[in-house]
Image (cartoon, rainbow, N blue to C red):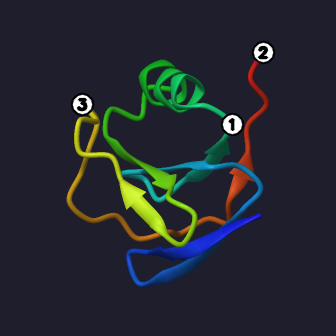
Amino acid sequence: MFAGMINRRFVISCHPFFVVCAKGIAAEFETLECAERFLSGRGFGVGSIYRHNGRDWDKLEKNPWAVDHVDLIEPAVHWEDS
């Protein structure tokens, strides 16, 4: 389990990568590649990818879909990579 703060919200995930999209949709992933494919392939346009560092969530700075601040509206959803 991975836990920490994202945008003043406590987030718990089973996977080390967490995505927050501009529409407030959140998803968790096992790899960075899966998180990037999710953002690029779902038509969200913008979003932020976070990686857990062992204590808290770090926003990845080299993310081409990054946004400054997005509120989590919907609960975390685990998207299966197919």
2 in relation to 26, above or below: below
User: Quick one: label 1 or label 2, which is nearer the N terminus?
Assistant: 1
Q: Classify mark 2: helix, strand or loop.
A: loop
* Picture residue at 28% right of the left edge, 36% below the top: 63
> What amino acid is found at the position of numbered circle 3 in the picture?
Pro
11 and 69: which is toward the camera: 11
Could you tell me which quadrant the C terminus lies in? top right
8 and 42: which is toward the camera: 8
Q: Are marks 1 and 2 in contact (CB under 8 Å)?
A: no
33 in relation to 51, above or below: above
Q: CA distance from mark 1 to mark 2?
A: 13 Å
Q: Are marks 3 and 2 in contact (CB under 8 Å)?
A: no
Provide the residue designation for mark 2: 82
The circle on residue 71 is none
Provide the residue designation for mark 3: 64
Residues packed near mark 1 inside 10 Å, few (<14), some (14 to 19) or many (20 plus): some
Could you tell me which quadrant the N terminus lies in? bottom right
Q: Position of residue 56 (x, y in %)?
A: 50, 71
Residues packed near mark 2 inside 10 Å, few (<14), some (14 to 19) or many (20 plus): few
Q: Position of residue 67 (x, y in %)?
A: 24, 51
Which mark lies nearer to you, 1 or 2?
Answer: 1
Provide the residue designation for mark 1: 30
**Which quadrant of the structure image shows residue 75?**
bottom right
**Which quadrant of the structure image shows residue 2?**
bottom right
